[in-house]
Image (spheres, rainbow, N blue to C red):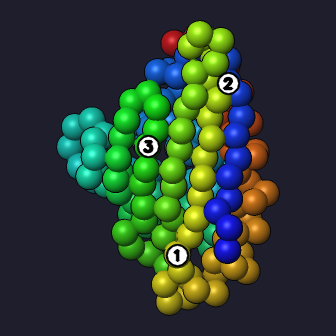
Amino acid sequence: MAIIRESIDVDRPPGEVYAYITDPSHLPEWQLSAVAAEPLDEGPIHTGSRVRVTRRVGSREVAMTVQFDELDPPHSWDLHGVDGPVRPRTHGEIEPLDDGRRSRVTIDLDFEGHGLGKVLVPLVVRPQVRKELPRDEQLLKDRLERSTD
């Protein structure tokens, strides 16, 4: 199946957007399915960092571990799921707009199902994410544009 891709423009500089998006503590603030996110490694997020994310998938809560494969501040990040029945593969890019005063955020998502996840991915996960990702990006935009930090 095709990768799910969504983009949105945010009235904040790329560095601020990148710092917010790659900080796991903010995940439940802007992703509707994220119930909790907990770093599993000490210190700041870096290539190889793992995060335990609990998501609502349909009517269930599913915990999974994701690992950052690449971090290129403030331009892009990659991560993938390392356990759980549904393993995401995410690529995000932040493009500067208006001489760096604004940003375009593009998120690409794909999924690999294991065990029960082979059924969940096409029947529940993909349809849910197709609806949710545009709303997540709108929440991200709203949070960042409201923030004065």
On the image, numbered disc 1 is attached to which residue? 112
Task: Give how far apart the Cα atoms at labels 3 and 1 are.
Answer: 19 Å
Disc with the residue nearer the chain's start (3 vs 1): 3
The residue positioned 50% from the left and 89% from the top of the image is: 115
Look at the picture and state if 16 lies above or below 98: below
Image coordinates of residue 2 in percent, x first then y, are 68, 67
| Amino acid on which disc 2 is placed | Val
Look at the picture and state if 23 lies above or below 124: above
Disc with the residue nearer the chain's start (2 vs 1): 2
| Amino acid on which disc 1 is placed | Glu
Please, what secondary structure does the residue beneath circle 2 have?
strand
Query: Could you say which is closer to the camera, residue 136 or residue 4?
Result: 4
Mark 2 crowd level (few <14, some 14–19, many ≥20, 10 Å Cα): many
Name the quarter where the N terminus is drawn.
bottom right
Image coordinates of residue 42 in percent, x first then y, are 20, 43
The residue positioned 75% from the left and 46% from the top of the image is: 134
Look at the picture and state if 55 lies above or below 103: below
Task: Give how far apart the Cα atoms at labels 2 and 3 are.
Answer: 17 Å
Q: Quadrant of residue 117?
A: bottom right
On the image, numbered disc 2 is attached to which residue? 10
On the image, numbered disc 3 is attached to which residue? 77
